[in-house]
Image (cartoon, rainbow, N blue to C red):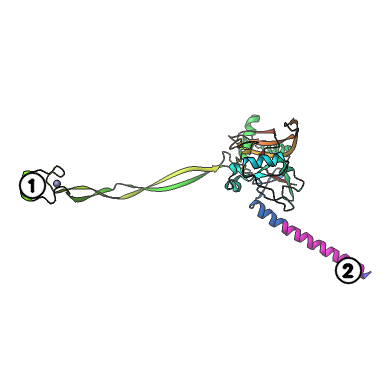
Amino acid sequence: MLKRLTMKLNYFQTTIKLIVFYSICQFFYIISNNSFAQDITIGSQIWMTKNLNVTTFRNGDVIPEAKTNQEWNNASANGKPAYCYYNFDPQNGEKFGKLYNWVAVNDPRGLAPIGYHVASKEEFEILISTLKGNYAGYDYDKTEGACKSLCSEPIFETKISYVDVGGYYDKKWVECANCKNWNNEYRRKVACHVCKDERGKYIQGKYIPKSKKKIEEKKEIGGWCGNNTTGFSALPGSSKAWGEGFYNPFQCDIWTSSEAPESKDYYGNTYRYSWKISLSCTGYSIRPMNVEYGCSVRCIKD
Ligand SMILES: [Zn+2]
């Protein structure tokens, strides 16, 4: 009896230990994989505030990076998961996150960190309709208000420089190279055509500044055209086109997990919906997206 109770207790302790260990792993997994992405609550939903930037699936398996159009096309054609950076430039990852192909999004190993999932079409619709409630006017005014509140603000950098003002040029005496060795007799007969027999002249010397003027230049270096009052921080991360190059430059284009049964590609693959915010941050659309394309991913809490 006592032995059985001890065994039960041991089993219980082991379970607790495993849960604690698992939670710690999960904590570090989220930190290491998504650069301290934070959550925000909008209505009944909890969203990550950054596009997904993970390089592994939930089980730790590595997602291959496509570094060229060819690598991207091969992955999609062979049904292999892949991600790439906008313009294949890893520096864009920190800001925009990665662009994943649909195979990666749909992989059974799980792309979203544990506790989160790739948001569905319906969840994006709920997000917009929740925010539209905050604005008055016609439907498009409400939509504009909602979209602007989801998009990041423009980021400015102020460059400060100083210019010299009110200064003067120092005068500098320069001996005439043409006539400096002439004797006086020769000088009386011939006029030097360079210095007119002054044996040199004052020329403009160094600039002596008296005061400096501060110049401030405000330059837009990133962000977008929203007001981000929600903190959702949508960014124009573009999307990867099938074939060559990138699509929808400077537009937010995020995969939803939902099938678009009305559209199929040449190979018979069913499209999935993606959620796009227009260039001006004033409107959005949810449209069928070819599964060979690449989009950003934004996760929502389970
Ligand atoms: Zn001279």
Write down the quadrant of residue 291 in the picture.
top right
Relative placement, left or right, of 206 versus 186 is right
Could you tell me which secondary element the residue under label 1 belongs to?
helix
Find residue 103 and report its horizontal and vertical position in percent: 72, 42
Give the residue number, with chain letter if any, for mark 2: 6
> In terms of sequence position, does the residue under pointer 1 or pointer 2 come before the other?
2
Relative placement, left or right, of 214 versus 196 is right
What's under tag 1, amino acid-wise? Arg
Give the residue number, with chain letter if any, for mark 1: 187
As drawn, the residue found furthest toward the bottom would be 2
Q: Magenta stretch containing residue 20, yes or no?
A: yes
Using the image as rendered, state which of residue 142 and residue 166 is in the foreground: 166
Viewer-nearest of labels 1 and 2?
1
Find residue 123 and report its horizontal and vertical position in percent: 73, 39
What's under tag 2, amino acid-wise? Thr
In the image, the segment drawn in magenta is 3-25
Callout 2 environment at 10 Å: few (<14), some (14 to 19), or many (20+)?
few
Using the image as rendered, state which of residue 16 and residue 70 is in the foreground: 70
